[in-house]
Structures are given as structure tokens and as C-alpha cells.
Image (tube, rainbow, N blue to C red):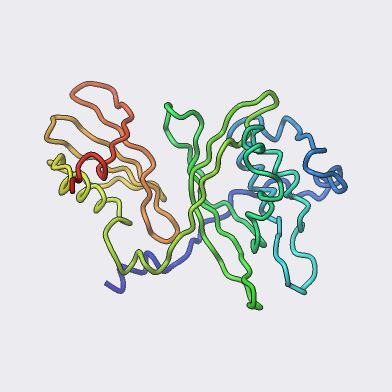
Amino acid sequence: MVLQNQRYFRPSCLPALNLRLSDWKFYEPYYEKTHDQIQLPAKLTKTPEDTLLNYFSLLREAENIAGRSCGTIGNGHIPFPIAFNFLSTNYQKKLSYQKYLHSFSGIGHTSLIKLCRVPDVSTGIKFFYEIETIEAFKGKTTEYFGYAYGFIQLVHEQTGYRIADVQQLTEDFLCAPYHGWDQDAESIVDVKYGNWCKLLIKRYPTIQKDYVKHIFFHGNDGADYYFIFITLTNGTDVEMAQFRKKGDEMWKQVNMKPEEECLTE
């Protein structure tokens, strides 16, 4: 049990992906400008991947920590007005700049450690991401590492791809190792589609590449099912996509919800 749980207690050793925009000359045109005076160069948002890598590269050295007396940290607040312009027009209407800035309270550094496009044709352009942050807490004189993950939706506007929505969930390093089964992809499939839905006949060996798990099983309806999971830094597996096919059909994306469809009071 102790050895198995090292999966959950050891943080990420993955290299950061957001290493662009490191030249101070990039920031010079924006020093005295507010968020509504900034126009992004089109090259920063040319593709969905460019948008996200450049966005998180700005946030890498962005700092919004109060009460530390060790001098300037990173690029301070300078990146935030620029980063705000990576949001879509509609998203900016829902989220004011002040609320956006406040959402980074306590954050002194951000590393993007996982980025994966979600194969979801029904909801447009969607990515899974995971970040590692250095965070400061009131009353503490040292900082701590924090981890968060979620999904990002993008849309194409006139000058490039913009972020239309961001979901962010913080990672837990204590409860998951000690309680439950729903942090493990294989257990999730066995319990939800076997015990709950009585659908699973045979689950095949997991195919894992880096932090991505591919799980296949055969159902009692004669169809085959394929699930993609992402393994987080805390060891928890998060479902990213579901597919189904019967016989010689092509894989079709589905959205099964065992909690709603298989569990009854």
C-alpha cells in the first residue's frame, strides 16, 4: 500500500512547455498600456497551440503576490494586461480585468506541464491542460507548489484564436490516496461500466504513453468502447474522451454518464 501510494505523493518532474516570450524586448511596447489599449500581434494567435503556449508563456513570470519583501518577482504585473487580450470578446464581457487579475492572487510563477488537444468535434476546439504554480500564503514566509488542471475552449476571431472559456480545478494530494477508487482509470471503467451499468464483458490491457491512458473494453451490447484518460501530477486519472463502435463501424464519440444513466435510488 505504501509503495503503491508513492504515485500520489510525488509531484511532477515534467519540463515546462511555456518557454516562449522570454525576451524583455517583447514587453517594452506594453509597459505603460492598460489592457484595453493593447492589440496583440497576429502571430501570437495564429494556431490554437500558438495561442495557448504564448498565453501560458506570458503567465510564466507573472506575479500577483502581496506582502513579500524580497524585491521584484519575475515580470510582476506587466504580463497580465497582455494575457487578458488572449481571451475572446465574449469571455472578456463575462470576466472583468479586475476579476481576471484577482484570480491570480497568491501566484508567483506558472509552469505549463501538460497540454493535450481533446478529440471533441461536437464542442469545437478544446484542450486539456495542467499547470504547476508557486504560491504564497498569508502569514507564511515561504512559498509552496500547487497543481491545477482543467479544460480550455477556444474560438477563432478576426485576428486569430482566442480563449473562450477556462475550467480550472485544484489537485488534491491527500484524500485521493486514502479514499475511494475514482482516481484510477481502470477502476473507474470497472465500477461505472461493470458494476453500475452491467455493460462491461471484458476490459483489455491498458495502453499507456507518457501521461495518456488508452482503455478498451467489449460490452454486452456487442459494441467496443474506447476511453482516453490523462494522469495528473497527483496520480489521479481524468477522463478526456469516450468512443464507441460496433462491428466494422468507425469509432464514434459518445458521452455516457453512468451516474445519471445507470444509478437509481
Q: Position of residue 22 (x, y in %)?
A: 74, 50
Work out which residue is located at the far top of the displayed protein and give it: 249
> At 49% across and 28% down in the image, what residue appears?
124
Residue positioned 26% across, 45% down in the render: 259
What is the residue that sits farthest to the front in this orientation? 265
x and y, in percent, of residue 5 in the image: 33, 68
Q: Residue at x 82, y 44 (%)?
A: 34
Q: Is residue 241 left or right of residue 31?
A: left
Q: How many marks?
A: 0
Q: Is residue 49 above or below residue 171?
A: above
Q: Nearer the viewer, residue 233 or 164?
A: 164
- Which sits in the foreground, 97 or 26? 97
Residue 235 quadrant: bottom left
> Does 106 appear above or below 161?
below
Say left or right for 214 vs 47: left
> Which x, y percent locates residue 255?
32, 34
Left or right of 17 on screen, residue 79: right
Looking at the rendered image, the quarter that the N terminus falls into is bottom left
Image quadrant in which you'd find residue 49: top right
**Residue at horizontal 31%, vertical 71%?**
3
- Residue 250 drawn at (x, y percent): 28, 23
Say above or below: 153 vs 245: below
